[in-house]
Image (cartoon, rainbow, N blue to C red):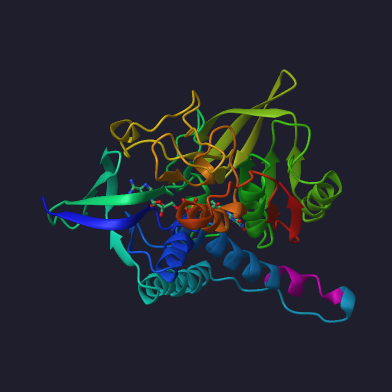
Amino acid sequence: MPTIKKTALVIGAGTGGYPCAIRLGQLGVDVMLVDKGEPGGVCLNVGCIPSKALISATKLAHKAQHASQMGISFPAPDVDMATMQTWKAGIVHKLTSGVAGLVKANGGELRKATAQFLGPKRVKLTYADGRADDIVEAEHIVIATGSLPIEIPGFPIDQKHIVDSTGALDLDHIPGEMIVIGGGYIGLELGQTFQRLGTKLTVIEGLDRILASLDKDLASLVARQIKADGGEIITGARAKGVVERDGRRFVTIDVGGTEREVPADVVLVAVGRRPITGGLSLDKAGIKLDDKGFIVVDNRMQTNVKGVYPLAMWWDSRCSRTSRRTKPKLRLRSSRARKRSTMRGLSPRSCSPNQRSPWPG
Ligand SMILES: Cc1cc2nc3c(=O)[nH]c(=O)nc-3n(C[C@H](O)[C@H](O)[C@H](O)COP(=O)(O)OP(=O)(O)OC[C@H]3O[C@@H](n4cnc5c(N)ncnc54)[C@H](O)[C@@H]3O)c2cc1C
């Protein structure tokens, strides 16, 4: 197997990995960026960008339907989901191909391959098209492999009737009734997207309110809008399972010890995300994990293996989102020159169920 020598290797071309590789390229570092999927990771392919595209389109329809109070009346919108999905896919494609171009333009090399550690600074690249594996040896390695939706017992994802966020973003029809399990920002953004098109939305949340990490006043604005659009929010509820009867799904929920069934055409499971832990063979690199499977890092976000850095999703005892775009740059600067430590402090976050809501988190 041929061995490729690089100064830096970034594994994962999401919003954490690709800006990191671009910045390294700008700093004159010989860098390779590897991803098993399309560049842009979750955010560009199945997260922020496609969701915001659908949100903006459905807000337009919603606004038009509620404009009569401003003295402007439109006929009910005629929504063609297939066209909307094609439009969304075009936006995603434009952005992901832009990432590939940016990496190249800044001197980096992008490869589509699955990476797996063979040793502390040795990584095997396996290509889906069947060409021979490569070995990369790099002085610095950034692990930016991101996360996957969490699945819960009783709700096997089929991406048709029981979907995660990826499946919800690809629905080719407007469901009559949708249940969202999990009142976090991802479930609500997607639930409200379909609600604006006429779907009857029910949100099942285990805690006593939705958007628990968001300011209470901002969260109550979202709850008010869901109810104003005919939706229901059931808090303090645990979703136990789903059964099919006469072509419909019925979700059993437990609210304070009392069981109840809620009907749905589509059930969206949006209870959080977990770091991708499998497949990288971190043990072969000798990288230490904590008991929850997160990578243990020092105050410069370096693993116990010198020169190997995970991005925020992987840090022990915490996950963060938007911060990933800025933290890699800080880390790389610190590793190359300034040797300064990086604080794991608050970072800006935002979500956009009905209005964009920023908060520190
Ligand atoms: C529906 C939805 C909406 C969202 N909206 C927002 C928003 O509005 N604002 C916001 O800030 N965040 C949002 N997020 C979160 C945001 O998408 C993530 O925080 C972000 O994508 C994380 O970036 P990342 O680079 O850490 O990981 P990812 O984007 O998950 O990228 C990791 C990459 O690593 C690759 N990979 C994994 N394992 C390997 C391997 N062994 N070899 C090679 N490649 C590998 C994967 O293919 C993937 O491309 C949203 C998420 C979802 C699901």
**Residue furthest top in the image:** 257
Residue at the image position 47 percent from the left and 34 percent from the top: 295
Q: Is residue 212 left or right of residue 328?
A: right
Main SS type for the magenta part? helix
**Residue furthest front in the image:** 338
Where residue 210 appears, as percent x and y from the top left, is 74, 41
The answer to whether one can see residue 199 in this image is no
Q: Is residue 333 left or right of residue 350?
A: left
Q: How many marks?
A: 0
Foreground of the two, 2 or 82: 2
Residue at the image position 54 percent from the left and 33 percent from the top: 316
Q: Is residue 31 left or right of residue 169?
A: left
In magenta segment, residue 66: yes
The answer to whether one can see residue 27 in this image is yes
Residue at the image position 27 percent from the left and 55 percent from the top: 113
Where residue 222 appears, as percent x and y from the top left, is 78, 52
**Residue furthest bottom in the image:** 72
In magenta segment, residue 251: no
Question: Looking at the picture, does residue 168 appear above or below residue 147?
Answer: below
Q: Quadrant of residue 256?
A: top right
Q: Which residues are magenta?
A: 61-68
Question: Looking at the picture, does residue 100 appear above or below residue 279?
Answer: below
Q: Quadrant of residue 90?
A: bottom left
Foreground of the two, 169 or 140: 140
Foreground of the two, 110 or 168: 110
Foreground of the two, 340 or 301: 340
Where residue 119 appears, as percent x and y from the top left, is 26, 38
Where residue 153 appears, as percent x and y from the top left, is 50, 27
